[in-house]
């Protein structure tokens, strides 16, 4: 996945970019709206004027990032289905730039808010739908191109997204990431047996 | 898995049982040490005398439950490896008593504390080791009995525990559990292809 908030276009995007940077630096537990105000290039009061609470800012930031992810998807992403699938799995297993790796831990904190907060639950429900839909589209493209076996794209996508969610949870909450090498091997076995066609078949 | 805290033996176990009940009822976000005191059959002041903070109580409760799980494991658990594996997967996918289903959501909240809290991180690191070790033992037993294929027990165990972690995370933080049916099918496919021997082989 590409970098987030590279070139914010207006004040709103600059505020959301400051929210993202602050989330990466501090995580959610230590996040305050005044820390976001400090990270914002212009006047902190602009942040307070537009947003009432840190959760309002965080949720708008998450929604913005998800919309950006959806907007950047093109037909070209479906031209190399195996590459896209491996990129997706790799991202969940830690092959991401350091800043995004830190953000994954923050996402785990944010996602746990959804246990008791409806607005977070609505966001992560939609976010899962987007990622499952994307992975299922990639798998359908692979089947159409005869690079993948005939399989149930939704079923495989739900399984991959769930395993990736677990990988992000475990590596953010365990003392070592060593466990993930076993997961990488296990998923390669799963994809080889259920999804990829053997070479030359 | 059997029920927790059925017959607490002494004051300490009664306090931990009250902690468990309160966690099931309130979750972590709304947990207070005085709510635990109220759930305790004897004097609430006994709770405050022994524990300084709610996290101290919660961590001792989690450690106690993990030790109970380990203490209850016997050789007999390895006599039906396929049954044990299906029970483990089913528990993660929601085939648990209602009280334990509620506790799974609380576990997600507690686990997210490990992003910024070392004591929680140490607990969940150990907890993952225990469950991965258990699943790997079950798989080794299945291979020894020729019910399972020759496979790498640790690799399969890490993958299953990770997918189960993701399933518990997703079902605690999404509006619907419908996604988990795809995961159930996907895992059955994984186990059929990688672990179980075909009938009669």
Image (tube, coloured by chain):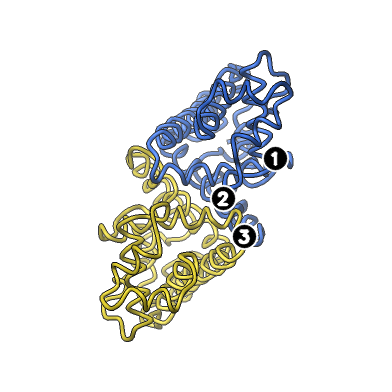
Chain colours: A blue, B yellow
Left or right relative to B115: residue B167: left
User: Nearest the camera: B178 or A44?
Assistant: A44
Q: Which of marks 1 and 3 is nearer the N terminus?
A: 1
Q: Which quadrant, please, contains the N terminus of chain B?
A: bottom left
Whole-angstrom CA distance, mark 2 to mark 3, is 9 Å
Q: Earlier in the sequence, mark 1 or mark 2?
A: 1
Q: Name the residue under label 3.
A: A179
Q: Name the residue under label 1.
A: A96
Give the answer, above or below, for where B113 lies relative to B150.
above
- The number of discs equals 3
Instruction: Name the residue: 45% across, 53% down.
Output: B108
Q: How crowded is mark 1: few (under 14 residues within 10 Å), some or many (20 or more)?
A: some
**Rendered location of residue B27, percent (x, y):** 37, 55
Whole-angstrom CA distance, mark 1 to mark 2, is 13 Å
Residue A141 is tagged as none
Q: Residues within 10 Å of mark 3 (few under 14, many from 20)?
A: many
Q: For numbered disc 3, what is the local secondary structure?
A: helix
Q: Name the residue under label 2.
A: A167
Instruction: Name the residue: 63% across, 38% down.
Output: A23
**Rendered location of residue B83, percent (x, y):** 33, 67
Left or right relative to B93: residue A14: right
**What chain letter is assigned to the residue under label 1?**
A
Determine whether label 1 and label 3 are within 8 Å by CB: no
Q: Which quadrant, please, contains the C terminus of chain B?
A: bottom left
Q: Do labels 2 and 3 share a chain?
A: yes
Q: Can residue B143 be seen in this view?
A: no
């Amino acid at each position: 996945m590409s970098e987030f908030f590279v070139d914010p276009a207006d004040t709103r995007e600059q505020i959301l970019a400051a929210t993202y940077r602050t989330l990466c630096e501090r995580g959610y537990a230590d996040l305050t709206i005044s820390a976001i105000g400090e990270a914002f290039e212009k006047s902190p009061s602009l942040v307070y004027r537009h947003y009432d609470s840190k959760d309002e800012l965080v949720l708008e930031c998450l929604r913005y990032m998800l919309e950006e992810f959806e907007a950047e998807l093109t037909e070209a992403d479906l031209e190399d289905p195996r590459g896209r699938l491996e990129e997706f799995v790799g991202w969940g297993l830690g092959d991401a730039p350091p800043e995004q790796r830190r953000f994954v831990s923050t996402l785990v904190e944010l996602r746990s808010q959804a246990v008791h907060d409806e607005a977070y639950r609505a966001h992560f429900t939609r976010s899962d739908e987007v990622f499952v839909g994307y992975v299922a589209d990639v798998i359908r493209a692979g089947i159409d191109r005869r690079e993948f076996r005939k399989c149930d794209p939704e079923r495989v996508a739900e399984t991959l997204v769930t395993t990736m969610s677990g990988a992000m949870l475990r590596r953010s909450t365990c003392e070592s990431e060593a466990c993930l090498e076993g997961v990488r091997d296990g998923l390669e076995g799963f994809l080889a047996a259920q999804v990829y066609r053997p070479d030359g078949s």
